[in-house]
Amino acid sequence: MATQKITLAKGLNMGLRKAMEDDPKVLVMGEDVGRLGGVFRITDGLQKDFGEDRVIDSPLAESGIVGTAVGMAMRGYRPVVEIQFDGFVYPAYDQIVCQVAKIHFRSKGNTKMPMVIRIPFGGGIGAVEHHSESPEAQFAHTPGLKVVACSNPVDGYWMLQQAIASDDPVIFLEPKRQYHADKAELDDSIAPEPLFTSRVVKAGTDLTLLAYGPTVKTAMKAAEAAATEGKSIEVIDLRTLSPLDMGPVLDSVRRTGRAVITHEAHVNLGMGAEVAARITEQCFYNLEAPVLRVGGFDTPYPPSRIEEDYLPDLDRVLDAVDRSLEF
């Protein structure tokens, strides 16, 4: 394939297609994933090319979708389940936490659970209730689940294929406001990084800024804005939330002495709390300031008219950066 510029939506579509071409046991299930091609068109064209037996339009029943996928995975298939919106995952929460996450352990390793649950997450699209949530911490807190969050088109293409190839169940989080927002250049001749790894996406010396999913773009803008004031910010895309890959994070903080983490989920007991605790435990004598967190407020996700006041934006991230540097 020649190098081409793709959106995140296109990268995910191409990743699904490649996985289905490579392995006939890979199938796609979910609401409107077939004829419609998914509400965000991530599965566009797949049913036409692979047939209704491998791209399955399901009833509006998330618990049934995931429960069916559990049985398929136990029989050797590799189902890729689409949850149409983040807030719709809760009817399937019992299946995910009680079955998907535990079968491998419960069977003493004899029964694998190779399935991917794709969840568009986060806000910024002007949607109604239950369409803009960030439930990642609930899944990362569940032993037996792997949780990853892509942030860009190239990662979307590779990470989805890697998740499908994994024998462990993977919650695959996709920042929905990035689906069609930006393009990046994909060259599939370049080998990807391993799935469960974090990555430095911008080098810096004064402070480490951590993000994942939709807030990576915000973090990059914050680093660019800070550079105009002579501040050198290192940005790390966590990419994997369970397991956390803390190696690059700890190396960075030991150099910069300061850390800020931002995510759209509300701050209380969010992913930032775990990251901050680990940094404090392992970099205590390197820190020049407390680890700061920037996230949503401790309220249910607000009506779309005021969602921009809820989401961590450039100003709020820069305020945390300034507070850390002034400490």
Image: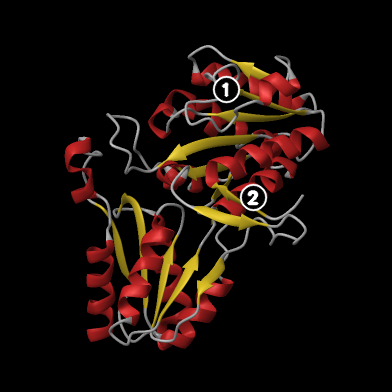
Q: Amino acid at mark 1?
A: Val
Q: Considering the image in quadrants, where does the C terminus appear?
A: bottom left
Q: Residue 309 location in percent, x, y?
A: 18, 50
Q: Amino acid at mark 2?
A: Met
**SS for tag 2?**
helix
Left-right relation of 184 to 48? left
- Name which residue lies at 32% across and 87% down: 230
Q: Residue 159 location in percent, x, y?
A: 64, 50
Q: Is residue 193 visible?
A: yes
Which residue is under mark 2?
A: 159
Left-right relation of 115 to 199? right
Instruction: Give the mark nearer the N terminus: 1 vs 2.
Output: 1
Up/down of 60 relative to 158, above or below: above
Q: Within 10 Å of the Cα at label 1, are there few (<14), some (14-19), or many (20+) other Cα atoms?
A: many
* Display coloring: secondary structure
Which residue is under mark 1?
A: 33
